[in-house]
């Protein structure tokens, strides 16, 4: 299969970086401190901004204050945060002006995890603190497209979570999904589901990007 686009928008956690153990540890600690089932907190946190997870699970708390606490806990927990297979190859193949990372993490956390994983820091990064509504709202991916100067229809998104897939679809974008965090059955709204980033390569053409899927 071959897909064409002008730019690629990557989610971060679960797509480029494996932070699942750290996410589970942090949200388990937070949930237990507030009488919430850890499994419920972890499931809700994947692919969403932390502030929105707090609002959904503990509306009686000050979401902004709790968000700052969770953010610092996640920045401090770097054990097991590694680059996923194929991530470095894709990021070094694509010209800087043709890709962005669009993540539900804040800027400090995103920069920290990219560094922990040993990946190059991109020029273009859209984070949780730069949008008023997180995924599944289309705002994050629309902002990513605008940052690169392309229309939504010209962008292809790579995601691992239903909320992120919905965000991209709501923005009118093609989506490649990888089942690193959720099973393939939960990602059925994507254009195509790949076993990993190793199943795709990018060819930079004069007027477009060609995504080759094996």
Image: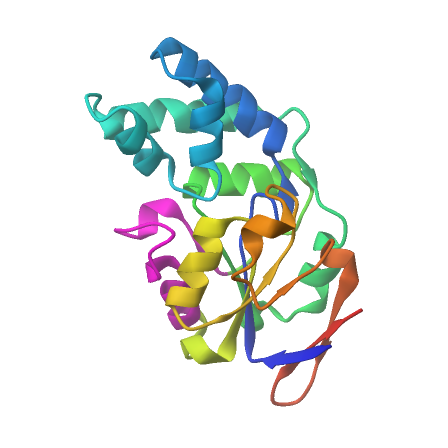
Q: Measuring from the top left, give residue 156's x and y in whole percent.
A: 54, 70
Please indicate whether residue 39 sits to the left or right of residue 51 in the image.
Answer: right
At a point 55% along the width and 25% down the height, the residue shown is 24
Task: Report which quarter residue 4 is drawn in.
Answer: bottom right
- Horizontal relation, residue 62 to residue 87: left or right: left
Look at the image and say whether residue 179 sits in the magenta stretch.
Answer: no
Rendered view: 105 above or below 140: above
**Residue 212 appears anywhere in the view:** yes
Q: Which of 125 and 183 is in front in this view?
A: 183
- Using the image as rendered, state which of residue 150 and residue 168 is in the foreground: 168
Extreme-bottom residue of the structure: 207
| Rendering colour mode | rainbow
Location of residue 44 (image quadrant): top left
Give the x, y percent position of residue 15: 62, 50
Q: Which residue is drawn at 38% across and 71% down?
A: 146
Residue range of the region highlighted in magenta in the rendering: 124-147
Between residues 134 and 130, which one lies in front from this camera angle? 134
Quadrant containing the N terminus is: bottom right
Question: Residue at (66%, 44%) from the top-left corner?
Answer: 180
In the rendered image, residue 66, in percent from the top left (x then y), is placed at: 30, 23
Question: Compared with residue 185, is residue 189 higher up or lower down, i.e. above or below?
Answer: below
Residue 150 image point, x, y percent:
44, 78
The answer to whether residue 126 is magenta is: yes
Whether residue 150 is visible to the viewer of this picture, yes or no, is: no
* Quadrant housing the C terminus: bottom right
The quarter of the picture where residue 139 lies is bottom left
Q: Residue at x 43, y 45 (%)?
A: 104
């Amino acid at each position: 299969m071959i897909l064409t686009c002008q730019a690629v928008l990557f989610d971060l956690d679960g797509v480029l970086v494996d932070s699942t153990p750290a996410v589970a540890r942090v949200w388990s600690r937070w949930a237990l401190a507030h009488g919430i089932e850890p499994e419920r907190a972890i499931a809700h946190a994947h692919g969403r901004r932390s502030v929105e997870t707090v609002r959904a699970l503990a509306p009686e708390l000050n979401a902004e204050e709790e968000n700052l606490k969770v953010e610092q806990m996640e920045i401090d927990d770097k054990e097991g945060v590694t680059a996923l297979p194929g991530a470095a190859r894709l990021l070094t193949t694509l010209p800087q002006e043709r890709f962005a990372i669009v993540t539900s993490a804040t800027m400090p956390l995103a920069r920290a995890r990219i560094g922990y994983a040993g990946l190059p820091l991109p020029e273009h990064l859209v984070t949780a603190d730069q949008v008023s509504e997180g995924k599944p709202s289309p705002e994050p991916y629309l902002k990513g497209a605008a940052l690169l100067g392309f229309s939504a229809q010209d962008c292809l998104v790579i995601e691992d979570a239903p909320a992120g897939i919905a965000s991209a679809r709501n923005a009118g974008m093609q989506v490649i999904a990888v089942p690193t965090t959720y099973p393939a059955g939960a990602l059925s709204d994507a254009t195509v589901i790949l076993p990993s980033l190793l199943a795709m390569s990018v060819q930079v053409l004069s007027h477009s990007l060609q995504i080759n899927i094996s």
